[in-house]
Image (cartoon, rainbow, N blue to C red):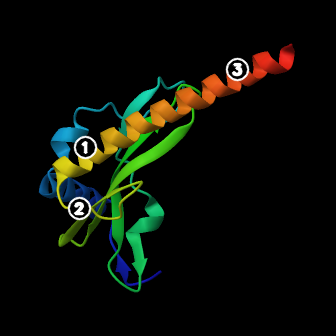
Amino acid sequence: MSRWRISKGKAIDLQEWALEKSGVKKFLNSLPELPKKGEIKPGLYVSYEIDKREIDGEIDWPDIGVAWVYAILPDGKRECLGEVRAYNWETVWLCTKEYDEIDNAKEWWMQIKESYEKLKKRRKRFLKEDKDFWFCSKQ
């Protein structure tokens, strides 16, 4: 065990601080939480589950993921579109699939929504092309 470790309780406190400090809380509150089991309808979801492996920073204070935004596609596939990370009540990072660091919550949220729309269009096109191919191969 390393000396740079925080407890699960402190990680939850850090999570609450980061969501408030970053300004993303109001956007994430508009999303349903990602269910842990069962069938999930397509759409955007948020997960606040803290990875226990991240609370041990080993050589430095840990930076932990405190929230993730997932797209659930019609075929059931899950894709992470954005993440919020925090470090020792000092720094918060807003990340997306395309950008490692975004300056403000509003821009972060816009990037996530744009990525989701692109993903839906790409999946529709892929499924349509796949369907057309299937019909062609049947003839």
Q: Nearer the viewer, residue 83 or 108?
A: 108
Mark 1 and 3 residues: CB-CB less than 8 Å, in contact? Answer: no
- Residue at image position (32%, 79%) is 61
Q: Nearer the viewer, mark 1 or mark 3?
A: 3
Tell me the number on the disc at residue 110. Answer: 1
Q: Nearer the viewer, mark 3 or mark 2?
A: 3
Q: Indicate the position of residue 32 as horizontal and vertical percent values.
A: 33, 30
Query: Can the viewer see residue 58?
Result: yes
Helix, strand or loop status at disc 3: helix
Q: Nearer the viewer, mark 2 or mark 1?
A: 1
Helix, strand or loop status at disc 1: helix
Q: Amino acid at mark 3?
A: Asp
In this rendering, the answer to whether 78 lies above or below 108 is above
Query: Can the viewer see residue 72?
Result: no
In this rendering, the answer to whether 125 lies above or below 138 is below
**Dot 3 or dot 2, earlier in sequence:** 2
**Dot 1 or dot 3, earlier in sequence:** 1
Q: In the image, is 124 to the left or to the right of 33?
A: right
Q: Spatial distance from mark 3 to mark 2, Cα to Cα?
A: 50 Å
Q: Spatial distance from mark 2 to mark 1, Cα to Cα?
A: 24 Å
In this rendering, the answer to whether 46 lies above or below 68 is above
**Dot 2 or dot 1, earlier in sequence:** 2
Tell me the number on the disc at residue 130. Answer: none
Q: Quadrant of the C terminus?
A: top right
Q: In the image, is 20 to the left or to the right of 8?
A: left
Q: Residues within 10 Å of mark 2 (few under 14, many from 20)?
A: many
Q: Indicate the position of residue 49 as horizontal and vertical percent values.
A: 39, 49
Q: Amino acid at mark 2?
A: Leu
Look at mark 3 in the image and give the residue it sits on: 132
Q: Nearer the viewer, residue 126 or 48?
A: 126
In this rendering, the answer to whether 36 lies above or below 66 is above
Look at mark 2 in the image and give the residue it sits on: 14
